[in-house]
Amino acid sequence: MDITADCVYTGGLSNSGETLTLYDPSSKVIDTANGNGGSWPAGSASTYGTMERASTAADSDSIWITNTGVKKNGKNANGGDILGTPKQSNSVIVKSSTATPEPTATPTFPPGPAVVDPRPILNEILARPGYDWNRDGRTDVFDEFIEIKNLTAIDISLNGWKINTLNGGKTFALPEVKLKPGERIVLYGKQTNLLLSDGGETVRLVNSSGKIYDAFTYNLARAEDASFCRLPDGAPGDSWFEDCTPTPNLINTREGKAPTSPDGAASIFCNLPDTIPVEFFIPECHGYGADIWNPFYWDFVNWIDKLWIQQANEKWRTFIE
């Protein structure tokens, strides 16, 4: 590239989208690019056309355009044209050579860019636990958790923020704490009472004015201790995976395994999904059924196609085929 850089940084920008934030020396947020954290509103990964600002208005998807090559500046490392205008004015102000000249208007000075408030994000969600994650001595639905992370370079107050569930119709006010840069907070079901259905739910992060700043929807919690998480950890945009290893208050990962009970035995609680009919759930999970949810029966290799589970301790005699 034949354009001398004013500053060289390490790393790279993801093609799927990121948020760029401009701070002043006091760490006050001055401006953002792609502030909603979604896909890039402009720019082209196929033609390498840059994303250019077309307006001094506050950041939104509508103020960005893709350079089309009408105006460009510089050569890339291969000697080709850069579809962008580094160190020159953006291409959006280029007028056609046949355009009728306009009279010079009295210059006006638009207001500076609006200050964009920093915000937290949803970072990891566990809807179907199989381990005592909240360490209360029990393994149950109250071990479900929602993790929130501060991605910015400044402290964020959670005062006035809420999380809610769309299908469950419940809301929880976040504790009045400050998250330092990169810090996270984990909220367990026992604290929030936001019970996350195994059959799907939408979790939303809402500010004090009721504006939804982040949301995640899952259709099914397929297995115990398989969390939904952002990868890489804290990545903005649509970067969710459904087969993560639960890591409350730690970096998200798909590696490793969830812990088991100290003696290595299977979970002692009834781990049927909470979407089954209550008529089936009550006898199977409250002392009357044959515990056919127990993984032992499905891992038992000595039966071929039929198995009688003998009646014991007032359990029903059950036939599996």
Image (tube, helix red, strand yellow):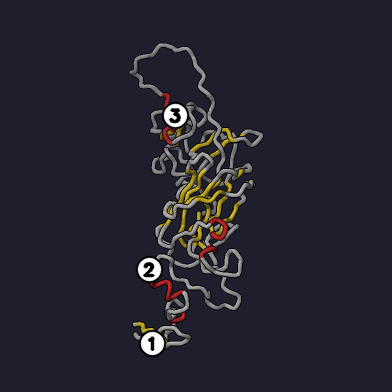
Residue position marked by numbered label 2 in the rendering: 277
Report how far apart the C-alphas of labels 1 and 2 lie in the structure: 24 Å
The residue at the point 44 percent across, 12 percent down is 104
- Residue 308's tag is 1
Judge whether 109 appears above or below 42 on screen: above
Sequence-first tag of 1 and 3: 3
Which residue is the site of mark 3?
54
Instruction: Tell me if residue 319 comes above or below residue 145 in the rendering.
Output: below
Q: Which badge, 2 or 3, is on the more N-terminal residue?
A: 3
User: Residue 24 at x, y = what percent?
Assistant: 62, 33
Mark with earlier residue (1, 2): 2
Mark 1 residue crowding within 10 angstroms, few (<14) / some (14–19) / many (20+):
few
The kind of residue tagged 2 is Pro
Nearest the camera: 125 or 53?
Answer: 125
Check contact, mark 1 vs mark 3: CB within 8 A: no
Three-letter amino acid code of the residue under disc 3: Ala
Where is residue 125 drawn, in percent x and y? 50, 57
